[in-house]
Image (spheres, grey):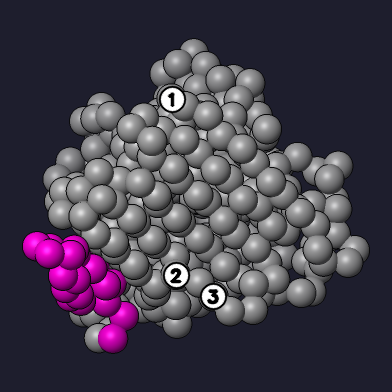
Amino acid sequence: MATPIITGLMAYGMSGRIFHAPFIHSNPGFTLKAIVERSQKKASAVYPDIISYDNVEELLNDAEIELIIVNTPNNLHLEHAIKAMRAGKHVLVEKPAAATVEQVKELFDVGRETGKHVMIYQNRRYDSGFISTKKMIESGRLGTLQEVIFRLDRYKMQINAKAFKETKETPANGLVYDLGAHLVDNAIALFGRPLSFNKTTGIYREGSEVPDYFHFHLTFPNQLNVFLISGLLIAQEQPGFIVNGTLGSFVKARTDVQEGQLDKGMMPTDDGYGIEPEGHEGTLTIVGVDNVKSTEPVPSDKGDYMQIFDAVYHTIRNNALFPVTEEQIAWQLELLEA
């Protein structure tokens, strides 16, 4: 492997601690050099050799760093990514990439202008459930697809302690930009740009100004209907993946274990990482001769967020095409900002 990519992380909150630092630290293609910690200095307890900078400017002024992971609040992604590229860094930007399609164009235009790679982090493409669902769709066993439903359910009545996240005055706020970016990306990764869409949102938690519920209906060629649903007040979690075709159905709960494992300190290279326990298999129902139904369990695939970072490495070192494309992100933002 070529020289590791010297990497800096803009924040060490939940995103940095769980979704980024363990992978950069564990992947031999990277060296995690520095993290911005504005107040509490916690990273050194896990990564003793880390440099803890007090602010973003110090991180960007580190000439050795080649790659910056932009995982600051949603409304700062565009500003910080552009600053990083103008400072000579490649960027991996947490979703959502920006608030509007126009801003996405600006983001990638600056990448072309500076000669730096812009890569958008969409980890839910590498959840165990999505990988299993994708394989089932591509197998053809379900026949012609009629209906696909992707859900991400939560129950969280309390308003976010960070008040700026609950105001409509702050760009890219609310559940549509948070979990919606995941579900829309899942649909686009599988089926491309929808022919049309309808979007419904709601605000049900007292004191919030931003949507805490959404429902997208996307239409695709061959009469395929895709529904993307999420809410913060769903008491009984529903299956995360439902696919109905002319020959059968596939149903899978959203039981990816990676976030929970990482939160408890497991590293991506540890034995058992990303593997769902028995009892969480998907269910395939096929209608055969004389309309006789047969049902079988479908073991879950291994979840593997490390694939994102492998792709980042090959994009920077080998100029490979990053799997999340500019076109796909523009399509995503069309739906999110509508």
Identify which residue is drawn at 61% across, 51% down. Answer: 215
Indicate the amino acid at tag 2.
Answer: Pro
Q: Nearer the viewer, mark 3 or mark 1?
A: 3
Q: Is residue 45 left or right of residue 144?
A: right
Q: Is residue 74 left or right of residue 217?
A: right
Indicate the amino acid at tag 1.
Answer: Glu
- Could you say which is closer to the camera, residue 144 or residue 15? 144
Q: What is the x, y in percent for residue 278?
A: 25, 86
**Residue that lies at the very extreme toward the front in this rendered image:** 290
**Residue that lies at the very extreme toward the left in this rendered image:** 289
Q: Is residue 123 left or right of residue 43?
A: left
Mark 2 or mark 1, earlier in chain: 2
Q: Is residue 191 left or right of residue 209?
A: left
> Residue 237 has which mark?
3
Q: Are marks 3 and 1 in contact (CB under 8 Å)?
A: no
Q: Are marks 2 and 1 in contact (CB under 8 Å)?
A: no
The residue labelled by disc 2 is 239
- The answer to whether residue 226 shows anywhere in this view is yes
Task: Label 2, secondary structure: give it.
Answer: loop
For the residues labelled 3 and 2, the Cα–Cα distance comes to 7 Å
Task: Label 1, secondary structure: give it.
Answer: helix
Indicate the amino acid at tag 3.
Answer: Glu
Identify which residue is drawn at 75% across, 40% down. Answer: 171
Which image quarter holds the N terminus?
top left
Is 135 contained in the magenta span? no
- Could you say which is closer to the camera, residue 142 or residue 24? 142
Q: What is the x, y in percent for residue 27?
A: 27, 57
- The answer to whether residue 80 shows anywhere in this view is no
The residue labelled by disc 1 is 327
Q: Which residues are magenta?
A: 279-302
